[in-house]
């Protein structure tokens, strides 16, 4: 079999793992700590997944600018203590990663989640053995999805046409475009639905990890 790519970069939330229980619970807990109303609409809460944390509080809760920094501090504390332990890898994900590794494809993670909890979650679910690099966001909020992807490409010393990003949201698609690499969407996460219209920027839209493997190894 021929490897289409040398490097496969995974988003974490909604792509590698279902992290929604921990994220949604911690987000509402944060709002309670601030004395603000919580959100019960799952579609609205889903907006909390993907963008940088500061933006999440704006688009999901319309939180006042002066409270954003405090909200981020509270959220990070709660997520570190409780939220990150509620993540569950999607069914078939370990098999996908093993197959990629067995075919000499380098796997890495690019996430807008803060790097420390992201690494902890991957280790806790025994997935760390499959990944060469795991890079995430910074507390200052200066990194973008695209810049994290480029950081991975530079460290691995691979060309852009040798890498692909796997992700579940438009935020991921934009990050891949910013970095100049191919993109494969998944419809089992928080963003894309099975009927999403594939554009020129998207190689494929996959319903499960098995379909992802078929797109990468021909």
Image (spheres, rainbow, N blue to C red):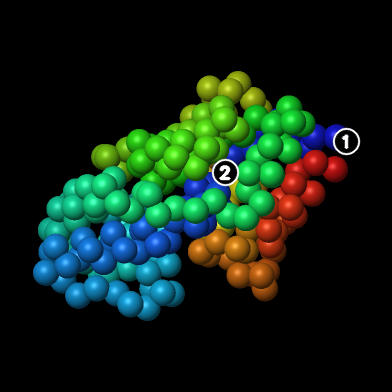
- SS type, badge 2: strand
As drawn, the residue found furthest toward the bottom would be 41
Q: Position of residue 139 (x, y in %)?
A: 27, 40
Q: Position of residue 83 (x, y in %)?
A: 33, 53
Q: Residue at x 76, y 43 (%)?
A: 216
- 13 lies above or below 154: below
Q: Which mark is residue 136?
A: none
Q: Residue at x 16, y 71 (%)?
A: 36
Separation (CA) of disc 2 from disc 1: 22 Å
Tag 1: Cα neighbours inside 10 Å, few (<14), some, or many (≥20)? Answer: few
Tell me which corner region of the image, top left, top right, bottom left or bottom right, holds residue 124.
top left
Q: Position of residue 112 (x, y in %)?
A: 41, 46
Quadrant location, the C terminus: top right
Residue placed most toward the observer, 38 or 166: 38
Quadrant location, the N terminus: top right
Q: Position of residue 42 (x, y in %)?
A: 41, 74
Label 2 sits on residue: 10
Q: Residue at x 77, y 31 (%)?
A: 103
State the count of labels: 2
- 73 lies above or below 198: above
Q: Which mark is residue 1?
A: 1
């Amino acid at each position: 079999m021929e490897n289409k790519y040398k490097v496969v970069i995974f988003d974490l939330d909604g792509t590698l793992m279902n992290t929604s229980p921990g994220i949604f619970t911690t987000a509402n807990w944060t709002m309670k700590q601030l004395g603000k109303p919580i959100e019960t609409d799952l579609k609205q809460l889903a907006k909390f997944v993907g963008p940088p944390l500061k933006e999440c509080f704006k688009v999901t809760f319309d939180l006042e600018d002066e409270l954003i920094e405090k909200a981020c501090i509270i959220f990070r504390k709660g997520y570190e203590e409780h939220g990150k332990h509620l993540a569950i890898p999607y069914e078939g994900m370990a098999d996908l990663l093993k197959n990629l590794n067995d075919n000499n494809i380098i796997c890495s993670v690019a996430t807008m989640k803060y790097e420390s909890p992201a690494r902890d979650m991957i280790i806790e679910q025994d997935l760390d053995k499959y990944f060469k690099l795991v890079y995430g966001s910074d507390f200052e909020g200066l990194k973008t999805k695209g810049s994290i992807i480029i950081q991975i490409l530079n460290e691995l010393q691979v060309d852009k046409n040798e890498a692909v990003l796997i992700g579940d949201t438009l935020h991921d698609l934009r990050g891949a475009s910013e970095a100049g690499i191919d993109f494969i969407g998944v419809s089992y996460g928080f963003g894309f639905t099975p009927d999403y219209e594939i554009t020129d920027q998207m190689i494929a839209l996959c319903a499960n990890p098995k379909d992802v493997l078929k797109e990468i190894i021909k």
